[in-house]
Image (cartoon, rainbow, N blue to C red):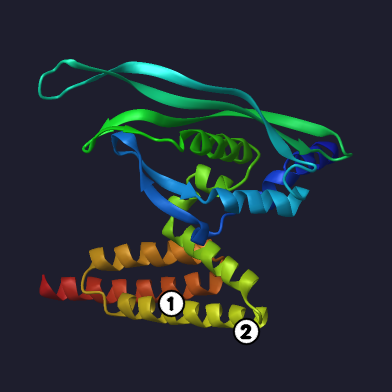
């Protein structure tokens, strides 16, 4: 990639790189329809990130509702009689246009939809959600912001990695700490204790299988932290213990 292309790429990713990381404390796990599991983001947190970047909502950035409708679905069937109840499933839908400032003061837009069940059936019977329009608005706004890179680490699946989540938790701890230097030292101390504990496990591994399993976990975490010295230490301990276990197997044979 030549210099001009690199500059263009950097410019194109400027918003994304400022907003892609997520505070784990602003998320929660959820299970959707059909058993789908994922990570939900606090919508107020996304608005806060946008406000920090662009200013108050309604000034240089905001949204316009292009469509606001209720969509009729299939009839709701009585499970005891298999006869239609006379009520149909309904979904509320909003089509939202988000506008935001580009470099130079020009405005750009992104459009997405938000959906919420309005009339539905659950174990308590037929239900109607009167807050469906509000939920659809929130859904559409979140989708528009995530298309611009807001909390992209969740959309890219990074939060499925426990090590990545811990890294973000530590980053937020430092950002919120009054004494950032002290907090960094505390985190480093916690990391040393973690490494000492796992190195001890490597030293006393009872089998080659246990040794390799623990070593993979340790190295994966150390790579995420760019701890090359830690990797060298763990590798040396693993090789030493492997030689000891191999020797025991040969003696037993």
Observer-nearest of 87 and 173: 87
Observer-nearest of 88 and 222: 88
Identify which residue is drawn at 69% across, 48% down: 50
Q: Is residue 34 above or below residue 160?
A: above
**Mark 2 packing: few (<14 Cα in 10 Å), some, or many (20+)?**
few
Q: Which quarter of the rendering shows the N terminus?
A: top right
SS of the residue under disc 2: helix
SS of the residue under disc 1: helix
| Residue 2 in view here | no
Q: Which quarter of the rendering shows the C terminus?
A: bottom left
Observer-nearest of 97 and 203: 97
What x and y, as percent, mark residue 248?
A: 19, 76
What x and y, as percent, mark residue 23?
A: 55, 59
Front tag of 2 and 1: 2
Give the labeled residue for mark 1: 195
Q: Is residue 186 above or below residue 216?
A: below
Q: Which mark is residue 182?
A: 2
Distance, label 2 to label 1, CA atoms, is: 20 Å
Q: Are marks 2 and 1 in contact (CB under 8 Å)?
A: no
Q: How many marks?
A: 2
Q: Quadrant of residue 188?
A: bottom right
Identify which residue is drawn at 29% across, 68% down: 211
What x and y, as percent, mark residue 219?
A: 44, 64
Identify which residue is drawn at 25% across, 67% down: 210
């Amino acid at each position: 990639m030549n210099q001009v292309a690199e500059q263009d790429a950097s410019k194109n990713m400027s918003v994304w790189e400022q907003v892609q990381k997520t505070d784990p404390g602003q998320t929660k796990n959820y299970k959707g329809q059909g058993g789908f599991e994922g990570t939900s983001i606090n919508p107020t947190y996304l608005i806060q990130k946008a406000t920090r970047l662009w200013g108050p909502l309604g000034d240089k950035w905001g949204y316009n509702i292009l469509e606001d409708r209720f969509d009729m679905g299939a009839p709701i069937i009585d499970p005891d009689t298999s006869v239609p109840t006379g009520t149909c499933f309904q979904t509320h839908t909003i089509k939202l246009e988000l506008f935001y400032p580009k470099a130079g003061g020009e405005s750009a837009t992104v459009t997405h939809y938000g959906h919420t069940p309005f009339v539905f059936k659950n174990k308590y019977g037929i239900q109607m959600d009167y807050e469906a329009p509000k939920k659809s608005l929130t859904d559409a706004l979140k989708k528009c912001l995530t298309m611009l890179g807001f909390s992209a680490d969740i959309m890219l699946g990074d939060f499925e990695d426990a090590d990545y989540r811990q890294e973000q938790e530590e980053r937020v701890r430092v950002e919120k700490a009054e004494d950032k230097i002290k907090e960094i030292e505390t985190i480093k101390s916690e990391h040393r204790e973690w490494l000492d504990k796992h190195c001890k496990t490597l030293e006393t591994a009872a089998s080659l299988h246990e040794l390799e399993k623990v070593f993979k976990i340790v190295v994966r975490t150390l790579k995420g932290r760019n701890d090359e010295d830690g990797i060298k230490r763990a590798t040396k301990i693993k090789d030493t213990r492997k030689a000891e276990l191999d020797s025991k197997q040969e003696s037993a044979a």
